[in-house]
Image (spheres, helix red, strand yellow):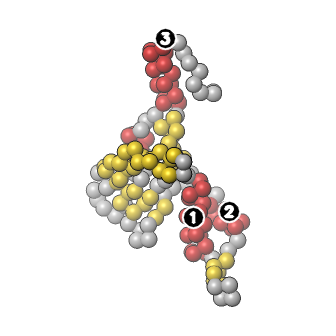
């Protein structure tokens, strides 16, 4: 999701991708206006729960952390910082959070979508209505 934050329109582009064999397959791409924030996803998708792509965020956030808090090593010609400090700093951040583009105009989110209790319940009711039996789809 990319959300333009300095626009009064609340312009947001939502792309739904499916990861297949190391590549992303675009399933849907839609633009929205009047989008107020990440909580609006719960209105659009009441059956879903969201989590960030931890590996992707860690890589992006670590680069940003080093650029902001790292110390320039003139001999090595690189920024140095300790991993421990990064993880302590990162532990204080929100569970669902954005990444910024270089201009600060757009907030990017890279999220995984899963089923919440409502979504799982719907599938169980659907299976019962379609097959006449309750299938055990999820571990509870």
Q: Position of residue 51 (x, y in %)?
A: 54, 47
First of labels 3, 1 by sequence position: 1
Distance, label 1 to label 2, CA atoms, is 13 Å
Q: Position of residue 53 (x, y in %)?
A: 55, 52
Q: Position of residue 1 (x, y in %)?
A: 42, 53
First of labels 3, 2 by sequence position: 2
Distance, label 3 to label 1, CA atoms, is 49 Å
Alpha-carbon neighbours of circle 1 within 10 Å: few (<14), some, or many (≥20)?
some
Left or right of residue 12, residue 110 in this image: right
Q: Mark 3 touching mark 2, by CB under 8 A? A: no
Element assignment for label 3:
loop
* Quarter of the figure that contains the C terminus: top right
Going by the picture, which residue comes out furthest to the front? 21
Q: Is residue 9 above or below residue 48?
A: below
Say which residue appears at 35% left-offset and 60% top-offset: 4
Residue 132 circle label? 3
Say which residue appears at 68% left-offset and 62% top-offset: 88
Considering depth in this image, is 66 or 25 the residue closer to the camera?
A: 25
């Amino acid at each position: 999701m990319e959300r333009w934050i300095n626009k009064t329109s609340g312009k947001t582009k939502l792309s739904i991708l499916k990861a297949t064999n190391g590549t992303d397959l675009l399933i849907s791409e839609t633009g929205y206006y009047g989008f107020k924030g990440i909580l609006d996803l719960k209105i659009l998708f009441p059956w879903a729960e969201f989590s960030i792509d931890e590996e992707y965020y860690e890589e992006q956030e670590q680069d940003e952390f080093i650029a902001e808090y790292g110390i320039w090593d003139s001999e090595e010609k690189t920024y140095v910082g300790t991993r421990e400090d990064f993880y302590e700093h990162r532990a204080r951040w929100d569970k669902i959070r954005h990444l910024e583009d270089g201009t600060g105009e757009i907030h990017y989110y890279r999220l995984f979508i899963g089923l919440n209790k409502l979504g799982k319940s719907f599938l169980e009711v659907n299976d019962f209505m379609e097959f006449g039996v309750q299938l055990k789809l999820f571990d509870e």
